[in-house]
Amino acid sequence: MAEQQKDDEILGKAYDSKIMRRLLTYVKPYKKYVVMAIIMNIIVAALPAVRPLLSKIALDTYIANKDYNGLLMISMIVLAVLILQAVVQYYLTYYSEYMGQKIVYDLRVQIFKHVQKLALRYFDKTPVGRTVTRVTNDVDSLNEMFSSGIVQVFSDVFVIIWIYVFMFGMAWDLALVVLLVMPFLIYATMVFRKKVRETYRDVRKHLANLNSYMQEHVTGMNIVQIFAKEKDELEKFSAINGEYRAANIKSVFYYAVFFPVVELLSAITFGLIIWYGGGEVIQSKLTLGVLIAFFQYTEMFWRPVRDLSEKYNVLQQAMASSERIFKLLDDETFIPDAENPVKLEKVKGEIEFKNVWFAYNPGEYVLKNVSFDIKPGETIAIVGATGAGKTSLINILTRFYDIEKGSITLDGIDIRQLEKRDLRKYISMVLQDVFLFSGNIKTNINLGNDEITDAQIIEAAKTVGADKFISKLPNKYEEEVKEKGATLSVGQRQLISFARALAYNPQILILDEATSSVDTETEILIQEAIQKLLVGRTSIVIAHRLSTIQNANKILVMHKGELKEMGTHQELLAKKGIYYRLYQLQYKDQEVVRTV
Amino acid sequence: MLDRKRKGNGLELFGNLVHLKKYFLRYKGTLALGFIFIILSNIGNVYIPLLVKGAFDELQKKLSTDIIVKNAILIALTSAFAGLFSFLIRQTIIVVSRKIEYDLRKDFWEHIQKLPMRFFQNNSTGNIMSHATNDINSVRSFVGPSVMYSVDNGVLFIMTLSILFSLSTKLTLYTLIPLPFMSLFVYLVMSKIHSRYTKIQEKFSELTTRAQENFSGIRVIKSYFRENYEIDQYSKISDEYFQRKMNLVKLQAFFHPIFFVIAGLAFIIIFLVGGNMIINNELTVGTLTAFILYLSMLIWPMISFGWVANMIQQADASMKRLMKIFNEPYEISENENTNHVIKDLQGSIEFKNVSFRYKDDLPVVLDNVSFKIEQGQTIAFVGHTGVGKSSLINLIPRMYDATGGEVLIDGINVKNIPIGILRTNIGLVPQENFLFSDTLANNIVYGITDGSQILIDKVTEIAQLNKDVETFPNGFETILGERGITLSGGQKQRSSLARALAIDPKILILDDSFSAVDTHTEEEILKRLKEFMKNRTSIIISHRISTVKDSDKIFVIDKGKITEQGTHDELVAFGGIYADLHTKQLLEEELSEME
């Protein structure tokens, strides 16, 4: 857990070549977009630089010579350049965003796919919210890097290059003078970036403190209130809140200094152009048009320099997100399929556990040396106190987890030799906590499997007695099911999960009976449904109902991870052992209910 | 009705932000100063092109370099002047925005703390957190950057325009032709962007919900081997998300080029019209240069207008969400009937026909419950899960208020006892243990202001935590929780007990507080508690017979009513729910001892 939590605190280096190289593999399929973007970038970066040149020509050639038609013509050229620039810019933005979003899409689907394959051990140790963040926020934060990030860097660099190309072309000595200011600008930007990074780290630290304080105290608000600590807590909160404010104000300072400094450098450049260039103009070495063009260039290159320095944050965030994503993608908690899986032609449904040992955590066995066998068509009931190992027993049968020692066979073949897909097709599981997905009743029964026809769905619902309440719903089988089936009653949810199992028509059925109490009417419905479910197939039931254990061919009594007793209801009662006591504890009361 | 709605629209647009008035007023001095700095800084900014113009006009005459050099130096100095004030703008306005953020968050927290448990049950922690972080943050962007940029750009806009008019009315009018289109364009596109953005958010939350649901229901998916189907479904939603994003991109990609085309048009007009005026000797090259420089100054205000509008829109929506929380009633509070003379409690408790339900449309949890507990008695409540035991004891320290009847302490209705007095005299150990990630010592003395080591030692001994503490890395100074060590369930329960004992309560309430403590330790604790609780009132809820059997009186609760009451022996003899529970626990003990 502790290690997992650290994941979210990864701040990330600004650049990690290993991560970057891996990220770039996602760009590969979109190589042509990258090439296209770069070409368009070169064009888009050059076009604005053309404009000052044209304005120079307009001033020096046409206005100076009072050539109004020439002026009109060059204006039209500027307009044409402008429109061209707009069109290219549009496509550039569109396609670089397209590429970025596509990559994000690919990555998201890949992560989701990967998570689907992960074994339950992964889900046991990872809070759902954390995995959700990986496929949502973390992936999304990469978009900026792929779309505007990479492309923008190119564009910024090209803009600077083009500006200098044109400036040197017009007046190399004046360009050199302007160039003098460049080191100062770069230096200022670097200092600023460093300071901002430091304060940013500070801000994040205090924000994290603030958030964890709030998170903790919202969760424990009842304690705060019970102990009447509101005043003290408000003081504590204010202190943390105040630290966060101080850190922010500190970062405001650097921004407040940096922007005027850039402006000042720009003004100094203006001064230099007028001072040096002005002298040249007086000596008629330069024209006024050149000076005006230079003013425009000066204003142009501060933006790309500043943009470039801001890319640092984008990069840093992307690195942190991708590090977390790659960590998840590298998690290979899989239940592997056999290399040459065996295919069963026809499943009879004979199951055998032979000296099975199983542990969730190495060394802490929850199942110890369990052996038994189930003949085809038999119904087996598993009983035992909480923590006796009942659920583990069914978890390993469908290979949610693999066992440590011993073997489990289906029709004489080790289940590890079968494909998981086939195994789970043969065995359906009805879990104690019925899980319904948002969708409708139909999709909750067939779980989106188109091979199960509507007729089969209705047939299954009818058999388990769910059809009665479903047909009363306004939209019947199309009735919307909200998240976790919130609109349905406990009993209705159970019946749907029975219908689900039946619709898949498995050779083997595992049923973990729910303990939650329902009204008598529903109870009778459920009992009848269970009987119909078990007919004609091998069944394993974690039994909480007296009726179920009485109808079972064999009862397995689990106790502290071991199989302690086995036999029919009457045999086991006569033994006066563990089962006898369990019966008194869990099932005897139900006799009263039945006679009532 | 319709009419009112239409009228309200203008105000409604940013109506929620009106609630920020009191915060702005708090810093009105600094803000006023900030606005003065904005004016000063912009005076500097607009002066620079004039200096350039002056230099150019000189250059055209090609006389001397004196004025040119002077102007060059002046440009740098003016910029330094403008820069100084630009620095001060941020130091005032943005700093104030951080202060307002602080105040707002503080008020938010102060408010949250007073809200009843009901609120915390209806709102997830994540939801409350998102208000305190995202929403306050977006309001902050309004208070700081939005206000600063709109004022700054507004001032700059007006100043620039006045100078342009004074330089050449004709050229200014021509130059201005394209600019209103820019504003109109912003106005039209922003609302579209907003609606597309909302659509993206909707899909994003679908992406989140779907993933959440999938990962939570992974067992079902795996047992029916539906992974591929789920992947398809998720890919589909991802694709829809992608499409919606691209829908926005199409608009955004359009946005930027349109801007510079319009700006470029203004530029062309300056050259075309201005050039013609130069040809006709109506204008100097210097003025033309000044126009070009001013134009670039005007572009940013025009662009930022849309940006600011967007921020304000978001801030308004956030403020609306915040106001919803700020308007949550405290429900449990002191009123005119509160008797502030009460400084202490004795500890007798009486429930008089108490009924309780969590919500009007939910079934009753407690139905007309009446009983009396004398000071110094130990009383137990027993019953199945969900019958209302915890709800019952929560009414005593007013974590909830009874919906019918009266809860009395020392004969006084709890609603008339000052909340602070009431709660500091009741030691409640809730069912769900919660310790703060702080040192163990601080957790134990949480309820008191000055906890001595003697006291800590005493209560940890009673709670039988002393032996555990010896094994902790830093003893009492060991930090608990995420950043420290994780306590076992039993250790948590015993720490929580120690914390309740430390406040020296007149009434101690244990809500199933020993469920994770082994029976032997429990016995030791109960033995010590008996001594400590002399003359104090104790209420114990438990599922374990061993915990309650020595109580002065045991109440059995079933379906919101007291169905059985008496001593252990009486109830066993009675043969009801209690007796049944008793037999079952004997069986369970037997079972757990079997090998």
Image (cartoon, coloured by chain):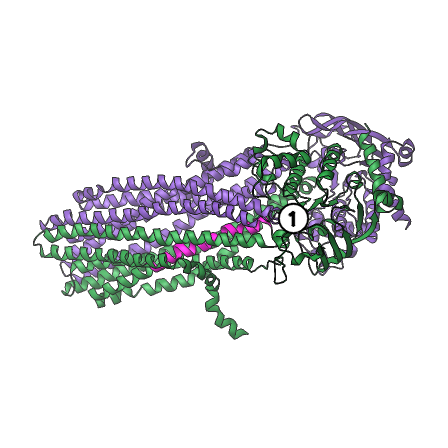
Q: Residue at x 63, y 46 (%)?
A: B213
| Residue A135 among magenta residues | no
Which one is nearer the viewer's eye here, B457 or B441?
B457
Q: Quadrant of the N terminus of chain B?
A: bottom right
Q: Position of residue B140 (x, y in %)?
A: 44, 54
Q: Residue at x 8, y 49 (%)?
A: A283
* Label 1 crowd (10 A; few <14 / some 14-19 / many >=20): many
Q: Which residues are magenta?
A: B124-152
| Residue matched to label 1 | B425
Q: Kindly identify which chain the residue marked by label 1 belongs to.
A: B
Q: Quadrant of residue A361?
A: top right
Q: Position of residue A401 (x, y in %)?
A: 68, 32
Q: Quadrant of the C terminus of chain B?
A: top right
The type of residue carrying mark 1 is Asn
Q: Position of residue A62 (x, y in %)?
A: 16, 58
Chain painted in green in the figure: B
Which one is nearer the viewer's eye here, B118 or B77?
B118
Relative horizontal placement of residue B511, taking residue B329 as reference (left or right): right
Chain painted in purple in the figure: A
